[in-house]
Amino acid sequence: MKYIRDKKELDGKIVILRLDLNVPIKNGKIVDETRINKILPIFNHLIERKSKIIVISHIGRPKGRILENLSLEIICKCLETKLQKKIKFIKENIYDLTKINLFENFVDQIIFLENIRFYKEEEENDNNFAKQLASLGDLFVNDAFSCSHRNHASVSEIAKFIPSYAGLQLETEINALRKVTIEIKKPVTCIIGGSKISTKIQVIKNLIPKFDNFIIVGGMANNILKYKGHPIGKSIQEKNCDKTISDIFKLSKNHSCSVIYPNDVVVGKTMEDNPKIKELHEVNNDEIILDIGPKTIERISNIIETSKTILWNGPAGYFENSNFARGSFEIGKKIAEKNKLNEIFSVVGGGDTWRNNK
């Protein structure tokens, strides 16, 4: 992988910069600017090199439709304020753009394209669309770590047509992950949430041989509870995943990795209900598991206490309702305490995990 840091090739070149600016917006206002703040260093780096910058990003899932409420214009204005630089926002069809007409005004240094997911070709990883994007610049820089697993035109396919580099944030994230996958300090614990095991099964299989503890929380844990014969009521679950779960337990046994899942839960009859702590066998048919219980929190805290490395991806419950955010909060609090004492190295990934604990 080629990194952009200190590359002389940047000087005076047109750089296509892929970012993840998928920030939460409510009532026309940005609720959390964390992702915007994190990409400021790459802008300052490119500006110092006198590069021309074309920003590509997305927000939401418009699925190829133009939706005004998912326009990037509000993010463009926010970035303009933070950088104290004029940014040209372009709504024109990407197929009508050329490298020459993009920077007709000599003073323009940063151009912001409209939501790339307004084009269905983006998520289809369309070859011709990626080629058109690449034709707009001299170099491609990917600084969207959280999007880098996607086979989308502006993430992967574009790199076939133009010299490509990893950005500053992407480099930082890769170095952090190297410490939890290669330069490991044991014991190592992975805490993983989310709703579907199938979307993360390959990650799980890759990490189990390297980790000492694998803690499964969130919606994914419901599948394991059901597999183990516990009632889960109306809780979110994934169909036809028994073999996948069986493989996880077999693999963990072969590699002496402990798989931990909830031993008590917090439920409600709706997502907006008041919380009730339940033992696993007490969950009723009309209830939804929405968080981990206090016994599980204590168990996870004890594991964190004895760990040297932590990888955490995905919240422990339905944190959008504060009644069901305690599990995620307590995990984050415990990791933060250990970090302050320099007793662990931790990597926290996933937008929901970060927003819930920042």
Image (cartoon, helix red, strand yellow):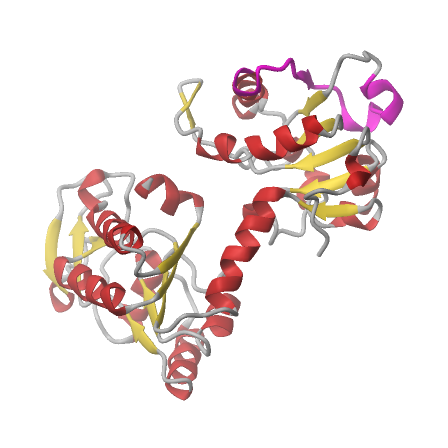
Compared with residue 56, is residue 352 higher up or lower down, i.e. above or below? below
The residue lying furthest to the bottom in this view is: 254
**Number of numbered labels in the structure image:** 0
Relative image position of residue 160 (x, y in whole percent): 82, 50
Q: Nearer the viewer, residue 150 or 284?
A: 150
Q: Is residue 178 left or right of residue 18?
A: left
At x 50%, y 56%, the residue is 176
Q: Nearer the viewer, residue 11 or 330?
A: 11
Q: Is residue 110 left or right of residue 213?
A: right
Quadrant placement of the C terminus: top left
Q: Is residue 312 left or right of residue 320?
A: right
Quadrant placement of the N terminus: bottom right
At x 48%, y 63%, the residue is 179
Compared with residue 218, is residue 112 higher up or lower down, i.e. above or below? above
At x 46%, y 65%, the residue is 180
Quadrant of residue 39 in the image?
top right
Relative image position of residue 211 (x, y in whole percent): 41, 74
The residue lying furthest to the right in this view is: 100
Q: Is residue 322 visible?
A: yes
Compared with residue 264, is residue 271 higher up or lower down, i.e. above or below? above
Specify start and end residues of the magenta stretch as a single range: 81-103
At x 42%, y 84%, the residue is 255
Compared with residue 21, is residue 166 higher up or lower down, i.e. above or below? below
Relative image position of residue 58 (x, y in whole percent): 59, 34
Relative image position of residue 115 (x, y in whole percent): 63, 29
Q: Is residue 47 magenta?
A: no
